[in-house]
Image: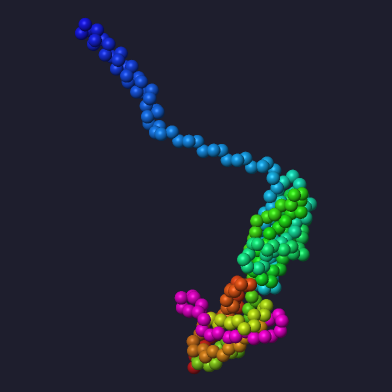
Amino acid sequence: MNTARRNSRPAVLAATFGSIGALAPLLLAGPAVAAKPPKPPTPNGAPALSIDAAPTNVVFGASTVLSGKLSGAKAPGVVVRIEQDTTAPFGDAFVPTARTTTTAANGTWSVSVRPTVNALYHAVAMASPTVTSPVKRVNVRPAVRLSVSDSTPARGALVRFSGAVAPAHDGRSALIQRRGTDGVFRTVARAQLRDAGTSRSTYSRRLRVRSTGVYRTKIAQHADHTNGYSALRTLTVRTP
């Protein structure tokens, strides 16, 4: 009797551990995780229209080139119309411009535009149905000029800083700035912009210069334009 029991123990143990071994992968796997639903398929061959601008910041009077590509089987020879929005809030009032172009054999297109104020652009491919691109912003800087009456003044002499700004910004301030030893420009004087016709404003201000320095004029950004800067002017103070 004892011998039979002893002989049955290996079989019982084998059966028990064999069952545990079969369950081990399930025990280690942890709780079941629901499978993610598959992504909806995208339409094959659906046309798309891209847009880019170079440069994205221009000085008033300069141009930028808008370009992109129309994808799809019917991409060549499609008329592309440029539309713009120049009123805040941007993006809700696009109107057609006079600028159009036609896609090349590979679907690419480009056209030059000359914005006068900050603007959002998008392109519309006149296919059937029409295809509209994303938007691209182009910022416009006022054109700012700065002249000085004397670039090598004596120490403590009065120097006239003057110039013009286009387009006209009558009543706004021209900020005359000097570069510090840390490389940061700081405003040292303000000059009111005065009427000089429909296309520009002028300014003038005299400053006492006591040391050599680098100057510029800044027109601060506002609703229609981003920051505008003149070229740098170096004043070298003469030593006795």
| Residue at the (35%, 19%) spot, across then down | 18
Residue 16 left/right relative to 111: left
Residue 50 left/right relative to 31: right
Q: Hey, which quadrant is residue 67 in on the image?
A: bottom right
Query: Residue 104: x and y, percent?
Result: 76, 53
Name the foreground residue: 134 vs 143: 134
In the rendered image, which quarter contains the N terminus? top left
**Residue at the left extreme?**
2
Give the vertical position of 150 relative to 169 (above or below): below
| Residue at the (71%, 81%) spot, across then down | 198
Residue 4 left/right relative to 213: left
**Residue at the top extreme?**
1
Give the vertical position of 97 relative to 163 (above or below): above
Name the foreground residue: 29 vs 115: 29
Query: Residue 68: x and y, percent?
Result: 69, 55
Span shown in magenta: 179-200
Query: Residue 47: x and y, percent?
Result: 70, 47
Q: Is residue 94 magenta?
A: no
Q: Hey, which quadrant is residue 96 in on the image?
A: bottom right
